[in-house]
Amino acid sequence: MNTRRILLPLALLLMVFGSLQAQFGVSGHYLSGQAENWEYDPPLSSLDRVEFPGNGWQVGVDYWFRLKNTRIEFLPTLAFTQQEQTIGSEPITLDAQMQGIHFFFNTNIYLLDLAGDCDCPTFSKEGPTLEKGFFLQLSPGYSLFNFDMTDNGTGTSYEADDSAFSIGFGLGFDLGLSDFFTLSPMLGARYYPEVSWETLGGEQGLVFPGEVSAESDLLQYQLGLRMGFRLDN
């Protein structure tokens, strides 16, 4: 990945860790992706439909703060993702990988408790669990992508980079296990209006069917778990 492209994420990471004075969290997600212009049916019926970028995972770190009188909470997050897909059959396969560094401004809205006064998300001793814990998440984001595709038949590797804005939506639920530790299972999706994987547009010696193009929208489905920690209690 281009060095200049990681300066912004690294600066954000330093800001996050430099301000970890109260509540912060780490998270992990399972990812699956759907990109209309990156899908095709191989000419051999014995092969499965190809759907780039494939399945993968996401890890992230966040810092938590909230509005004073309203249960709207903010969790700016720095995350890393990887999704992979292999097509063809041994010994001739094509291994594709999409990695990303992301900044997400996650915003949790507690629709059933907007006027609540609990010092959340660690609320193990305060009020009904459903009312205090259920939230809707909105998450604008900016991402830096690195794409790698390796032809194992020739040993040739093709790389490309791109950046893209996105918007995420999700539902989650806080489980306050103690005044120091909270678990939050989440289910959601993230939409990128346009991502460009230049290799899919055609490289010398690497040709895809006509319905595949470099640019596509991208929809990611996410299933994850956040672990929240409070150090100032």
Image (cartoon, grey):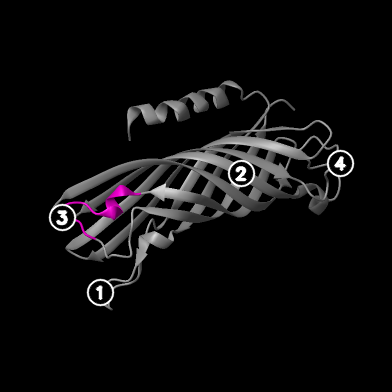
Outermost bottom residue: 45
Instruction: Tell me the element at label 3.
Output: loop
Q: In the image, 89: left or right of 131?
A: left
> Magenta includes 203?
yes
C-alpha gap between disc 3 and disc 4: 61 Å
Q: Which residue is mark 4?
A: 115
Q: Which residue is mark 2?
A: 139
> What secondary structure is the magenta-colored segment mainly?
loop
> Do the numbered discs 1 and 3 sit on residues whose CB atoms are within 8 Å?
no
Q: Is residue 3 visible?
A: yes
Tell me where residue 210 appears, x and y as whole percent.
28, 65
C-alpha gap between disc 1 and disc 4: 58 Å
**Which residue is located at x 25 percent, y 61 percent?**
208
Q: Which residue is mark 3?
A: 205
> Do the numbered discs 3 and 4 sit on residues whose CB atoms are within 8 Å?
no
Q: Earlier in the sequence, mark 1 or mark 4?
A: 1
Q: Which residue is mark 1?
A: 43
